[in-house]
Image (tube, rainbow, N blue to C red):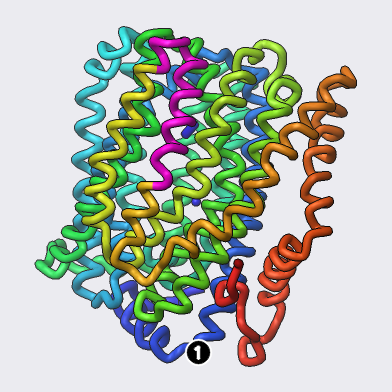
Amino acid sequence: MRPPRQPGTHAGRAESVTDADASARPSDGLGRQASRGVLVTMGGTWSKTILQTVSTVVLARLLDPSDFGLIAMIMAIVGVADLVRDFGMTGAIIQAKKLNDRTWSSVLWLSAGIGVIGTALIALCAPLIAAIYDEERLVLLSIAVAPTLLINGLAMPLQAKVQRDLKFGVLARIDVVSMALGVGLSIVAALAGWGVWSLVVFTGAASVYRLIALWTAAHPHWGRPHIDRAVVPLLTTGGSIFGVQLLNYLARNVDNVVIGRQLGSDVLGQYSRAYALFMLPLQQLNGPLGRVALPVLSRLQDDGPRYRRYIRAALMVIAYLTLPAFAIAAALAHPLVLLLLGPQWDATATIFALLTIAGVAQAIGNVQGWIYISLGRAHRQLVYYIVSRPVIIGSFFVGLWWNGVNGLALAYGLVSLAVLVPGFAWAIRGTFVTGRDVVLPVLRPAALVPFAFAAAWATGALELPALLHVLVGGVAGLVPLGLAMAIPAYRRDLAQILDFVKQTRKPAAASGTPMSERGTA
């Protein structure tokens, strides 16, 4: 299925203090917070991934592909409603320099109200959702999933508050525990024979716990019901962010609707599992980096040199850790799927291998969003997405017409890669970020991709059992990266990554220049 506050301190007043403190915080302290925040968040994400992998392995053997397909059908539509419910407010709250008590209270009431409306609309439209896919089972499933919109509406401003305060450890703990609860209860439900409803349990249990934990962490002060005019600037910025998120969501989910409508729930189930697997490397790094990068870059928006160094460092880390990973995963797609999902999911392997091309594009392209939002250029991002996302959506129909679900996956990846260059050119135009800041950090890790793929692919000739094949192939795929360390430029890159890790262990006052402030060329 598609991431310590003082007791008794209410949201608005606490934020005012935080804003004041932030302006006085030493620059080294912010760099150290960013470094530690990435590692703490990454640790939480890796823990979530372990849990998610356990869930994938177990549920894939207890449920049918059509069960996953049914949920994918619903979430492709409910997800749109959830974007409308958020309306880009999460990004707008994080990017805003200051928010007072009354504005925070207004945000809470506005988000809750939209959540109520969204829940009601999805419940009322359940028969229509079933009619779109010609699948009667979706009526009750849609009604059961609808309350997540209200839960998310209550949780959104609380998460933005905690994230804005750079409390990444709190968010990481909430993510891990909510995932563990959802996974545990869904497996129990599946063992009890609940079928597709065990996936509903997964979503519901995780969402409810997340709301309770965020409420405890943020201590919201609602005040009397009202929506102040002070939220208008947030809605203006959020509206552009929402437009971008909606177009991006469509570019990543219309494929589910098209496949579900044209090829049925079984093929969609295969595709949705392949998509979930290809998202794992992205979640390991881009999720933690993005959660930390937005509030940090927003604080650096008036400090061009430090902002550029952070962008360069982030791109380098993303490129080194995701590009070789996708290359190796594509080469080992068949034994990997056999190991994780079982023999009945064989068709998923080819889809997964083709989707890794889109994974490369998304891993690098996510940085565009950081630049737009942190510099307050969400309106410009919306213009670009209005042009680029319909092109990606069009590739779904062309690919499906050309070669079914495999053709769709390949077309999606190639077009996603093609729009990267104009995307970054438009994102940095008129800013202090240069083309060198974007291109140079990616060149060296990108050069390793074909060698990592070839080395991992070659192990297929050994005809090993799936587990051993994955292990041997993974090690073989890393050999080119190890050999590259003989080249001084690659050793410098490695030193910067290690410096980032060391930075989190230094006292704040003695902290040196963080990795986010060093060059990558």
Q: Is residue 162 magenta?
A: no
- In-image side of 478 versus 24 (left or right): right
Q: Residue at x 66, y 13 (%)?
A: 346
Q: Residue furthest left?
A: 229
Q: How many marks?
A: 1
Q: Is residue 414 magenta?
A: yes
Q: Quadrant of the C terminus?
A: bottom right
Per the rendered image, the range of residues in magenta is 399-421
- In-image side of 184 versus 498 (left or right): left
In depth, the one of 236 and 325 nearer the eye is 325
Q: With respect to residue 516, does 288 lie above or below?
A: above
Q: Residue at x 25, y 36 (%)?
A: 119
The image quarter containing residue 53 is top right
Residue for badge 1: 26
In depth, the one of 376 and 166 nearer the eye is 376
The image quarter containing residue 110 is bottom left
Measured from the top left, where is residue 196 in percent x and y?
50, 19
The image quarter containing residue 124 is top left
User: What's the residue type where badge 1 is placed?
Assistant: Pro
Measured from the top left, where is residue 388 in percent x and y?
30, 39
Residue 77 visible at all: yes
Q: With respect to residue 292, does 469 lie above or below?
A: above
Q: Residue at x 45, y 55 (%)?
A: 367
Q: Residue at x 34, y 40 (%)?
A: 248
- In-image side of 149 versus 252 (left or right): left
Q: With respect to residue 119, does 319 lie above or below?
A: below
Assign a secondary structure to mark 1: loop
Give the class, few, some or many, for how many residues have Cα within 10 Å of label 1's Cα (few <14, many ≥20).
few
Measured from the top left, where is residue 100 in percent x and y?
24, 77
Measured from the top left, where is residue 137 in percent x and y?
37, 12
